[in-house]
Each structure stands twice: as C-alpha cells, then as structure tokens.
Image (tube, rainbow, N blue to C red):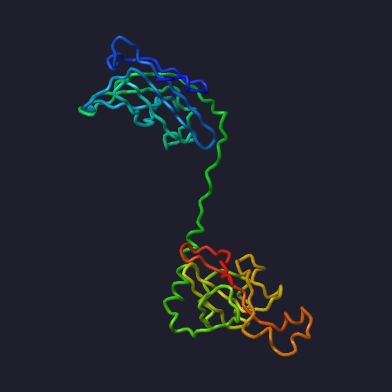
Amino acid sequence: MDFSKVKKSPVLLKEENRKFALDKNREIRGYLKIEADDSRGLVVVMADNVKFFPKGEYVYKLIFSGIKKEKRRYHMVGNVSLSAYGECEGSFRVNPLDLDGRGMGIWDFSSAIIAAMSTVNLHEALHPVLKGSFSVPRENFTLRKPAPADYSPFYNRVVLENCEIIVSSLKTFPFTAPFERDLTGASWKRISDISLFPVISPGSRALLEKYSHFIFGEREDCFLLGVPGRFLTEEHPDGGRSGFLLWQPILKSEKEPRKEELSTEERRRVTYGYWVAAINRYNGHIEEIPLIEG
C-alpha cells in the first residue's frame, strides 16, 4: 500500500495486537488523516498487514476516544474494509462540530483505534489492533448557534387548507372570464364571501370590502387570488410585499370610448382590474407567478 498518498500530516497508528497480523513476522502499520472545516470533515484511515478472516469471524471498526467532563467517551466512526491481502482502509464523512450526534466536537477526541469485533460471539470484548493519538484545536472552528425554530410551515399549511375549502365548494361559485388577455392561464371563479379570502394581506382587506368580492383561480401548479383594484399606489395590496405584484385590467376596460383622450393618471383612475398573487399548491408558499407566454 502506498502511504505516500496520505497528505496533511497523517497520524501514525501503532500496533497493539500482533494476533491480528496477516504475517506474524511483520508489524501491522496504519495511518489516519483528518481534514475538516466549519461544516464538513473527512476521516481517512489505512492499514497494512491486517489479518483477513474469510468467513467473516471478525470485522474491523474505527473508533475515536476522548475525555469530556472527566469521563472517557467513545464514538464508533464506522466499519473499515479489508482485502484478502491484508490491506485495510476506510473513508468517512463526518460533522466536525458534532461528531457523535450528542454534542462532542472533533476536538473532544484524542485517540483513534482500529479494533477487531467478533461476529460470532457478541459478548466478546473488542480487540484493539492499532492505536494513535491526534489533536485538532478547537480554535480552528467557528461555532455557530443553531438556527432558530421555523414555524412558518404551520401558516403555509393553513393557507393551503383555506384554499382547499374554496376548491371543495367551487361548483357553488360562478365562473368568470375577467381578462381579455390573461397571463396566468388560470380558470377563474368569482367569490362574494370575502371571509373565505385565504391569505393574510392587510392591504387587501379594504379593497375586498370596497368591491365586495375576489376571484380565485386554479392551475396544476398553483392557486391564484385576484384582488379587485385599480393600477394605483393606494389600491396596490401591501405595495406588493404580500405577493400581489401582477395587475391585469378587466375585459374591455382599456378600450372603452374616450379613454384614449385621457392622461395616463386619469386613465389609471377609471380603469379597473385585479392584483394577482400565486400560492404554490404543494407547500402553501406565496410565490412569483409563473406566467404563460404568448
């Protein structure tokens, strides 16, 4: 085995038990390499002249040992593979900030052991075969606080449930085709019961009460909501922050007689339409509307 390929100051693993040597006249040799940063780590171990058991009477484990709070602690990193020629190796991806899943960082360990474990007698003690010492300074790592709990999925679920209530009663709402050119490609229903409006949008409330309805659309990938209003700052729900960014004029509204004689501001004040938002029908997220081209 070519140990020259092991870089970054590999740790020498010294023989502990010649009983597990493939060739009793030669020493068992091994190396350990640890590479780690703040978010990921790689542990590589290699050994030579390790006894091979054709019937699998023993398997080999890589174990880390260390002392924390005056107690000796162990962590089984994983199984080490072995060839019939006595070549032993293993590669393990680890979380250096929480190596054992119970709060011990890689800096809390100081010894690496390759041990033989009996598969025949589960009560038989482990046999250390190779052992070496290592040190990983704690100051090499930036300890991050755990991310705060995220409760937004609950509210997304509520939005979806509200939409599903509307869908279950769609047959009771009148069909509407509000737009001459609809960039959403949705099928729309007009809903006069504004208490069914499924999302929290403070800026929509006054418009819903003023115009006494909203429209609800369906597509395979999303639900759509249309809040009635003009293309004016004062009638833009929440200034678009709640997802109502697309505005579409109602059918023939822009083509009414004499509108071409009006200024842009005057035309906006007499042209009605809907502010539209999309709800992902799989996770309840309010997202940018996927528009239909053409």
Q: Nearer the viewer, residue 36 or 125?
A: 36
> Which residue is pictured at 54% across the width and 28% down the height?
138
Residue 287 is situated, as x and y percent measured from the top left of the image, at 56, 64
Farthest-out residue, top: 25
When asked about the image quadrant of residue 16, the answer is top left
Residue 61, how many percent across, how many down?
34, 27
Residue extending farthest bottom: 257
Q: What is the number of callouts on the image?
A: 0
Which quadrant would residue 15 be assigned to in this image? Answer: top left
Determine which quarter of the picture holds residue 137.
Answer: top right
**Residue lying at 50% horizontally and 78% vertically, measured from the top left:** 187
The answer to whether 136 is drawn above or below residue 242 in the figure is above
Q: Tell me which residue sits at (72%, 90%) in the image.
A: 257
| Viewer-nearest residue: 292 or 127 | 292
Asked if residue 92 lies left or right of residue 180, the reply is: left
Question: In the rendering, at what x and y percent does residue 161 appear?
Answer: 45, 69
Q: Quadrant where the N terminus lies?
A: top left
Is 151 rendered above or below residue 126?
Answer: below
Q: Is residue 273 left or right of residue 61?
A: right
Looking at the figure, which quarter contains the C terminus?
A: bottom right
**x, y percent for residue 229:** 65, 78
